Image (cartoon, rainbow, N blue to C red):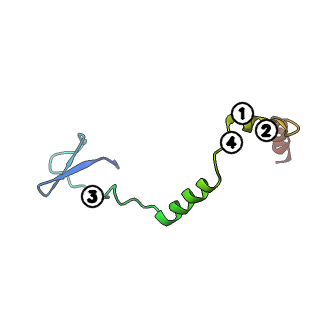
Amino acid sequence: MTKTLQAVYENGVLRPLEPLPLKEHQRVTVTVSDPSERWLDHEYMDRVRKDVAAMGPAPSLEEVRQALAKIPGRLSDDIRAEREIR
């Protein structure tokens, strides 16, 4: 059984916040991760945020629809044609 769950560390003991289907005194392997230490490249994410902010406001749904309406043909025809090639 592999299960990810939250626990609280109290008085030197990890206490699960939900019941576990384990036998009394059963040995398990525990991997501990601190949610405040995310595996994230913060410098990269800061750069992405700046780049997105520099782009200005996102287009409205109506603007996207108008732009897509100018594309000739139908997407379903393109998909069928691509499937026939394979």
The x, y position of residue 50, in whole percent, is 56, 59
Judge left or right: residue 41 versus residue 58. left
Residue at the image point whose x is 55% and y is 63% from the top = 47
* In this view, 34 is above or below 43: above
Tell me where residue 57 appears, x and y as whole percent. 63, 46
Query: Three-letter amino acid code at disc 3?
Result: Thr
Of mark 3 and mark 1, the one earlier in the sequence is: 3
In the depicted view, which residue is nearer to us: 22 or 38?
38
Q: Residues within 10 Å of mark 1 (few under 14, many from 20)?
A: few
The residue that disc 2 covers is: 68
Residue that badge 4 annotates: 59
Task: State yes or no: discs 2 and 3 in contact (Cβ < 8 Å).
Answer: no
Q: Which mark is residue 29?
A: 3
SS for callout 1: helix
**Foreground disc of the pair 2, 3:** 2
Frontmost of labels 3 and 1 is 1
Q: Which residue is mark 1?
A: 62
Q: Earlier in the sequence, mark 2 or mark 3?
A: 3
Name the spot of residue 59 as percent of width and height, x first: 68, 42
